[in-house]
Image (tube, helix red, strand yellow):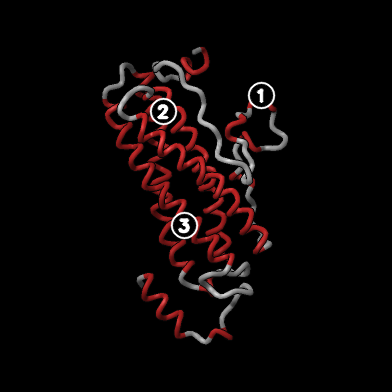
Amino acid sequence: MTFEGRRDVYASFNMEKMITINHSVGGSPLYDTLAEVSAILGRSKEALSQFQAILEPTIEKAADDHERLYWHHIYEEEEHRFDRLTALLPKLEEALADEAFLSRENGDFLRLLQDISLEKFGLHNFLEHLDLSLFHYKGTEHEPPITALRDMTAADYQRMKAALETLNRALDAPVSLAASVPTDEKEHQKDHLKLAQYAVPPSDPAPVRPSIGTRRQLTVGSLKHG
């Protein structure tokens, strides 16, 4: 059934018989937060497609196996995330069209929230991949579009963190968010393993891009010793 069709069916239901979460669908804090999550993930899916298009010729023209493997690894992770988002976004759209679905008593809804929380971690990884790529593409025609994607992703990551906290409070749902917490945000992780630019709380502005000097060959070794 299409999104519009589901809304028509929804409108014909007796509201008193529906399972509610103290609000009506559309305009409620819960609905608005889920709609924001859907918009964030939709933008990210589009952004990673643009990023992959930049990476493809880089992989093809890699100078050696080390460089090819480096970019292939990043490309493959984002391709996997693209596939996850392709499966997740229609489910999220259906959930937004059906108030009865939005209940802490609904196991399918709780599983959807778990999937959403994992995509918070995917968004964090995408941000790191964009930052890594800026070392390589500094001074090229790809720097401006990647910078734009990076800044959008940094802002969306903070929005995603805030959205998950809002959902968790609104539902008081038994959903574990531990798997969505990156190294930089783990309270008990060693400080020297954390990067400050990725540990900004949701109320703060988006992290500042790392300082990038002259263009260099992007490998793990060059980043460590450059």
Q: Quadrant of the N terminus?
A: bottom left
- Gap in angstroms between the C-alphas marked 2 and 1: 23 Å
Q: To which residue does mark 3 refer? A: 38
Residue 211 location (% of width, % of height): 50, 23
Checking the image for residue 133, the label placed there is 2
Residue type (three-letter) at the residue carrying disc 1? His
Residue sitting at x 62%, y 30%: 196
Query: In the picture shown, does residue 152 fall above or below 26?
Result: above
Dot 3 or dot 2, earlier in sequence = 3
Crowding at label 3, few (<14), some or many (≥20) Cα neighbours within 10 Å? many
User: Residue 90 or 161: which is nearer the viewer?
Assistant: 161
State how far apart marks 1 and 3 are (Cα). Answer: 34 Å
Q: Quadrant of residue 111?
A: bottom right
Q: Is residue 12 above or below residue 53?
A: below
Residue 188 seen in render? yes
How many other residues sit within 10 Å of disc 1, few (<14), some (14-19) or many (≥20)? few
